[in-house]
């Protein structure tokens, strides 16, 4: 018994001595991992932590021991350790179906000191190389594997080569629908005084104008409802079907206005029927502009999206010019009395043939490549019948995602839409009435001045779109916002001078300010949202802003002018819009030349696709090299700076 006690005592002393010797040599026991299961490895950095997770604590203890079966290499140093508070974290990852676990030991204290100073000494490097020779090889192998997995490059299948004839058909069909919509707006704006006499004859002239614009603004109150219906529907069943349906409703409601009886014929029922037609128009247009911009943006090549998108608003002002021009010609031929008697019906009746042509063109279209890919991916995910994913794809799930995950994009979109539409409706809808009813100009002069302004916008809008492809959307919006704040008062002051020349200069200034926003909106707004939510999110954001601020501009401006007697109210109104637009543009991320969110790159030719794939590989290799240097040789990166 005594012998056994002596032997045990000797062995215990020996183990204690060996432990003390190990501590003198600087080999301290490793710390245990206290992070929860599934925590991302911090040592690999934020960019490389994706998909690399820690094992559970009881597995970590097995991985910490050198020589454990399945590790593949002995214990090594830290992966990218750059802070003193980091602890060794074994990384678990999978490559080619083979699970591997690598345990890592902290770097020596000398290397930590060198990393603090930013530059290692040669003696410390030689000593660390001797101490960590086995671990460095394991760490290098781990980094190479992770970098190979993270070095994702584009393939030929990821890049979409657009079909030029199909792109031309898409732009033409989308622009024609916008032309139809704004033909009605131009007609209604130029006939505001005439319609007031036809449907509100018992009121004062100023009250007639306000009543007419109140009916005009009522259509915008239901536009958000149309956006809530048509937007998410377009994300689910397709852009093509919804755009065809909105074209039918818009054409029928506009065509029906031409058959309405006057107030003298049926009394109070006449303005009620006019209001109903306007509400139906507003409901249909709630899904028109957002759908058209989405359709063109998803068909256009990335480097020409601004130019092609500007053709949509080109159709806007062509439609307005056609409507206002037709009213101007009829006024010159029939006179004011003839227009009041029956001539006001003719412009609305023209909407019928235009609607049939637009419907025919839209039925010949195909779905956008981005939506087709999104649909295929969604169908593949639905095969797994995941209840969470099904709830996410539902209408309520999409609406919740829009306002919880993309609320910043929604606010930016609303600010830019406010800037564009306040300027737009001030020039196109209110300016003719402002010049005739407030400034006392004759109808023909006012109509010709605004029509000339629209021609200036039409001639310059595609140039602005092409410029935004080169300089960016954000600089164009910011420059236009600043110019609107500075030039609004001089422009309105010139219009107040009377005559032809000075008001013409004022109208041209407003037209050039308007084209800064019109030429870039169709390419900027769809890029704010991902593909699966783009139509719905854009419809809701766009129509809420238009309803609250854009369509009500003629009503508020005319009401404020009549209440205050200040003829500079339109200038102040434009200045406020410019300030809000500048704030929204300040927070806007540049999207010119970049793929849409949730979509792959789009180019015009196969040669551009090959060059894009090659550039992607080069950039991925450069990025992987920079990450390698940052993790393995942090002092080298500091010296490079």
Image (spheres, helix red, strand yellow):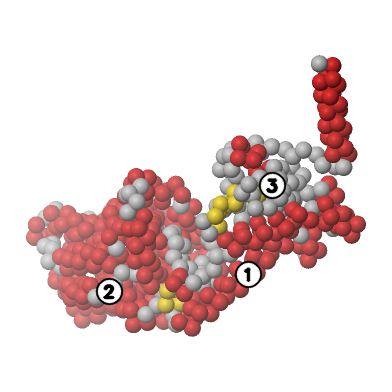
| Most foreground residue, 17 or 535 | 17
Q: Looking at the image, do the residues carrying marks 2 and 1 touch, with CB atoms under 8 Å apart? A: no
Separation of residues labelled 2 and 1 (CA atoms): 40 Å
> Mark 1 or mark 2, which is nearer the start of the sequence?
2
Q: Quadrant of residue 348?
A: bottom left
Q: Which mark is residue 374?
A: none
> Mark 1 or mark 3, which is nearer the start of the sequence?
3
| Most foreground residue, 332 or 8 | 8
- 181 vs 272: above or below: below
Q: Secondary structure at mark 1?
A: helix
Q: Is residue 279 visible?
A: yes
Residue placed under numbered mark 2 in the picture: 365
Does residue 131 appear left or right of residue 631 in this picture?
Answer: right
Residue placed under numbered mark 1 in the picture: 621
Residue placed under numbered mark 3 in the picture: 67
Q: Secondary structure at mark 2?
A: loop
In percent of the image, x 63 and y 47: which residue is there? 69
- Most extreme residue toward the right is 123
In percent of the image, x 13 and y 63: which residue is there? 260
| Most foreground residue, 432 or 375 | 375
In percent of the image, x 49 and y 52: which residue is there? 408
Q: Quadrant of residue 212?
A: bottom left
Rate crowding at label 3 as few (under 14), some (14 to 19) or many (20 or more) other CA atoms within 10 Å: few
Quadrant of the snapshot with the C terminus = bottom right
State the image coordinates of residue 595 (x, y, percent, origin top left).
Answer: 48, 68
Quadrant of the snapshot with the N terminus = top right
């Amino acid at each position: 018994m005594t012998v056994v006690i002596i032997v045990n005592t000797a062995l215990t002393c020996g183990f204690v001595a060996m432990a003390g010797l190990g501590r003198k040599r600087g080999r301290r026991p490793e710390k245990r991992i206290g992070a929860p299961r599934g925590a991302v490895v911090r040592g690999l950095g934020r960019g490389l932590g994706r998909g690399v997770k820690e094992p559970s604590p009881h597995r970590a203890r097995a991985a910490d021991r050198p020589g454990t079966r399945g590790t593949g290499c002995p214990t090594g140093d830290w992966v990218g350790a750059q802070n003193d508070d980091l602890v060794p974290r074994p990384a678990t990852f999978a490559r080619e179906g083979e699970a591997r676990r690598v345990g890592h030991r902290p770097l020596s204290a000398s290397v930590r000191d060198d990393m603090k100073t930013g530059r290692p000494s040669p003696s410390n490097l030689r000593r660390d190389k001797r101490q960590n020779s086995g671990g460095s090889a394991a760490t290098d192998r781990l980094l190479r594997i992770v970098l190979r997995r993270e070095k994702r490059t584009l393939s030929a299948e990821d890049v979409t080569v657009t079909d030029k004839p199909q792109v031309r058909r898409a732009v033409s069909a989308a622009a024609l629908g916008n032309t139809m919509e704004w033909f009605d707006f131009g007609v209604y704006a130029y006939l505001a005084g005439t319609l007031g006499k036809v449907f509100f004859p018992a009121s004062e002239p100023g009250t007639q104008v306000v009543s007419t614009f109140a009916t005009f603004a009522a259509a915008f109150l239901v536009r958000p409802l149309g956006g809530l219906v048509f937007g998410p529907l377009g994300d689910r069943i397709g852009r093509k079907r919804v755009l065809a349906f909105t074209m039918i409703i818009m054409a029928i409601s506009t065509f029906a206005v031409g058959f309405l009886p006057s107030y003298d014929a049926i009394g109070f029922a006449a303005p009620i029927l006019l209001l109903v037609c306007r509400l139906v128009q507003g409901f249909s247009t709630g899904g028109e502009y957002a759908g058209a911009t989405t359709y063109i943006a998803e068909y256009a090549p990335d480097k020409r999206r601004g130019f092609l998108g500007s053709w949509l608003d080109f159709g806007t002002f062509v439609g307005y010019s056609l409507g206002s021009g037709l009213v101007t010609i009829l006024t010159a031929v029939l006179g004011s009395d003839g227009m009041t008697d029956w001539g006001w019906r003719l412009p609305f009746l023209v909407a019928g043939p235009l609607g049939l042509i637009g419907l025919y063109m839209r039925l010949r279209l195909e779905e956008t490549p981005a939506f087709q890919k999104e649909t295929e991916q969604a169908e593949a995910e639905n095969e797994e019948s995941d209840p969470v994913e099904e709830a996410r794809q539902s209408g309520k799930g999409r609406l919740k995602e829009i306002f919880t995950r993309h609320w910043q994009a929604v606010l930016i979109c609303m600010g830019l839409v406010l800037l564009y539409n306040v300027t737009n409706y001030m020039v196109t809808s209110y300016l003719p009435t402002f010049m005739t009813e407030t400034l006392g100009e004759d109808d023909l002069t006012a109509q010709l001045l605004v029509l000339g302004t629209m021609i200036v916008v039409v001639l310059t809008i595609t140039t602005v779109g092409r410029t935004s492809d080169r300089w960016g959307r954000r600089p164009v919006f910011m420059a236009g916002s600043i110019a609107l704040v500075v030039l609004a008062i001089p422009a309105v002051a010139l219009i107040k001078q009377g005559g032809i020349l000075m008001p013409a200069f004022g109208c041209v200034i407003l037209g050039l300010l308007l084209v800064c926003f019109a030429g870039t909106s169709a390419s900027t707004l769809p890029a704010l949202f991902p593909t699966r939510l783009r139509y719905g999110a854009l419809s809701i954001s766009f129509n809420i802003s238009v309803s609250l601020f854009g369509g009500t501009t003629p009503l508020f401006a005319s009401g404020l002018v009549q209440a205050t007697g200040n003829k500079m109210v339109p200038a102040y109104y434009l200045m406020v819009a410019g300030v809000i637009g500048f704030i929204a543009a300040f927070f806007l991320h540049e999207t010119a030349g970049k793929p849409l969110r949730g979509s792959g790159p789009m180019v015009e030719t196969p040669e551009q696709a090959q060059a894009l794939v090659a550039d992607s590989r080069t950039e991925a290799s450069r990025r992987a090299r920079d990450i390698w240097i940052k993790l393995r040789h942090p002092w080298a990166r500091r010296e490079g700076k």
